[in-house]
Amino acid sequence: MAVEQVLSDHDSEDEVDDDIADLEDRRMLADFLDVTKDEKLIMHMWNSFIRKQRVLADGHIPWACEGFSRLHGPQLVQNPPLLWCWRLVMIKLWNHSLLDARAMNTCNTILEGYQPKKKTF
């Protein structure tokens, strides 16, 4: 640490170390036995995204889903089971009134934009 950091009044005790939080999240998810690896991966990706973006309120969920779809869209469309897991997460959020149909449609439109274009003859 620099001398300025040591002598400053800034208290870093409440700061979250993302690497440690990710490790703890993976360790916790590893304990689930009745969950597929894709389900664990999407849970970890979502937990990490929510933590790093500091999503704190229910009202933030729609833009968080859109941001998640933009950030992880390329990875999701490359792995169809993972993409289905993400869609199931959005359905669960919708069931709990945290995500509306418009936001879900926006997320799916974002994901469609990452799908490879099919060649027509």
Image (cartoon, helix red, strand yellow):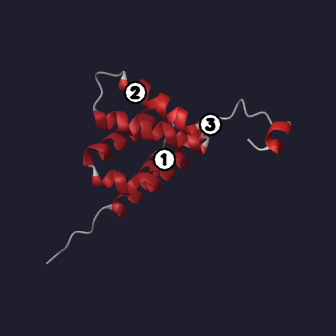
From the image, tell me which residue sits under label 1. 65
The residue carrying pointer 2 sits among few (fewer than 14), some (14 to 19) or many (20 or more) residues within 10 Å by Cα, namely: some
Q: Residue furthest bottom?
A: 121
Cβ–Cβ under 8 Å for marks 3 and 1: no
Q: Tell which of 32 and 102 is nearer to you.
A: 32
- Residue found 41% across the figure and 41% down from its top: 90
User: Which residue type carries mark 3?
Assistant: Ala
Label 3 – label 2 distance at C-alpha:
23 Å
Q: Position of residue 76 (x, y in %)?
A: 34, 51
Q: Secondary structure at mark 2?
A: helix
Question: Could you tell me the amino acid type at mark 2?
Answer: Leu
User: Which residue corresponds to mark 2?
Assistant: 29
Labels 2 and 1: the sequence-earlier one: 2
Sequence-first disc among 3 and 2: 2
Residue of label 3: 57
**Amino acid type, callout 1:** Cys
Residue 86 percent coordinates (x, y): 37, 43
Q: Compute the Cα span from label 2 to label 1.
A: 21 Å
Could you say whether the residue bearing mark 3 is in a helix, strand or loop? loop
Picture quarter with the N terminus: top right
Q: Nearer the viewer, residue 80 or 33?
A: 33
Mark 3 or 2: in front is 2
